[in-house]
Image (cartoon, rainbow, N blue to C red):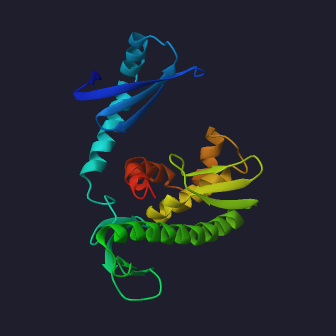
Amino acid sequence: MNTLKIDNHQLTYTIVSQKNRKSIQLKLTSSSHLTITAPTRFPKEDIEKIVFEKRKWLVKQITKLKAAANNPINKSVCDNAAILFLGQPHILKFMSKDTHKPTVHLEENQIMLNILPLTEKDAKAIAEKLLKQWYIHYATDTLAARTAFWASVIKVNPKRITIKEQKTRWGSCSSKGNINYNWRIIMAPMEVIDYLVIHELCHLRIPNHSQAFWQEVGKYSPHFKQCREWLRTNGTLIMTLLSCT
C-alpha cells in the first residue's frame, strides 16, 4: 500500500485514474487515508509533489477529522446517544409503546423515539429512518419560515425552495432563482441557519462571492464569519450522522 508522511501524520493513499480528468483531486476518507483522483498516466512523483504542496490544507483537515472522531456527539443512532439539533446536544430515548406506527417527538433536550418492540438490529434501522424523516420535516418548516422572513427583509423573491440530501454543500442558488438547502443544517444553531438563508438569498442579487457579496451578507448577518467557522468546525460531525440511510 502507498504511504506518505505529512508533517507528523502518516497517511496511506489510493490513486484513482480517470481518463477525462485534467486535474488532481484530493479527498480524505479518514484521518489516515487519502484518495487521489488523477488523470490517466499522471506520474506518481508529480502526484506526491502536489500532495506535498497541499500539506497545510491536509493537516488542517486531518486535525478536524481526528477531533470529530473523538467527539461523542453524532456518533450513532442508539438509545442514550447524543445528537445535534439546532446546535445543541439532545439525548435519544428509545421507547417501545405498542402503537400503530413508530413515532418521534421532542421533550426539552430529549428526542423520544417510539420504535415498537423490535430486535436491536431492526430497532436501529427503524430509528435511523424515523429520525431522518423527523429532521427533514423540521428543516422543511424552519427553512421555509426563515426564508420567507429574510426574503421580506432583503426584498428578494426566490422562485422555489427545495430541501435536499447533499454530501458537501449546505445550500445553493440557481440562476433561475431556485434555492436548495441541505436538510442537515437543522443540526446547526439558529444563527447559523439564518446565515445560510441570508447567504443564498443574497445570491439573488449578487451571483458570486465578490467583496460586494460579502458586504451584502454582512448587512443582515453581522456575525457571518463566526457562522462560517462553526460550519467548518462542525461540518464533519453533521455530515456523518445518518449518512448511509
Left or right of 121? Residue 86 is right
Q: Residue at x 57, y 70 (%)?
A: 142
Query: Looking at the image, which residue is at 70% across and 43% down?
Result: 207
Res 3 quadrant in image: top left
Residue 6 position, x and y percent, is 28, 24
Residue 88 in sight in this render: no
Answer with the quarter of the image where residue 73 lies. bottom left
Q: Is residue 236 above or below residue 30?
A: below
Q: Residue at x 31, y 49 (%)?
A: 68
215 versus 164 height, above or below: above
What residue sits 48% from the left and 66% below the top? 190
Left or right for 9, reference 112 = left
For the view shown, which residue lies furthest in the left direction?
Answer: 8
Quadrant in which the N terminus is drawn: top left
Q: For this rendering, which residue is in front, 131 or 227?
A: 131
Across and down, in percent, residue 240 comes to 40, 52
- Out of 227 and 136, give the one closest to the viewer: 136
- The reply, left or right, for residue 97 in relation to residue 135 is left
Q: Nearer the viewer, residue 29 or 200?
A: 29
Pinpoint residue 213: horizontal percent, then vertical percent.
64, 44
Q: Is residue 160 left or right of residue 11?
A: right
User: Where 189 falls versus 50 (above or below)?
Assistant: below
Q: Confirm whether residue 102 shows in the render.
A: yes
* Nearest to the observer: residue 103 or residue 105: 103
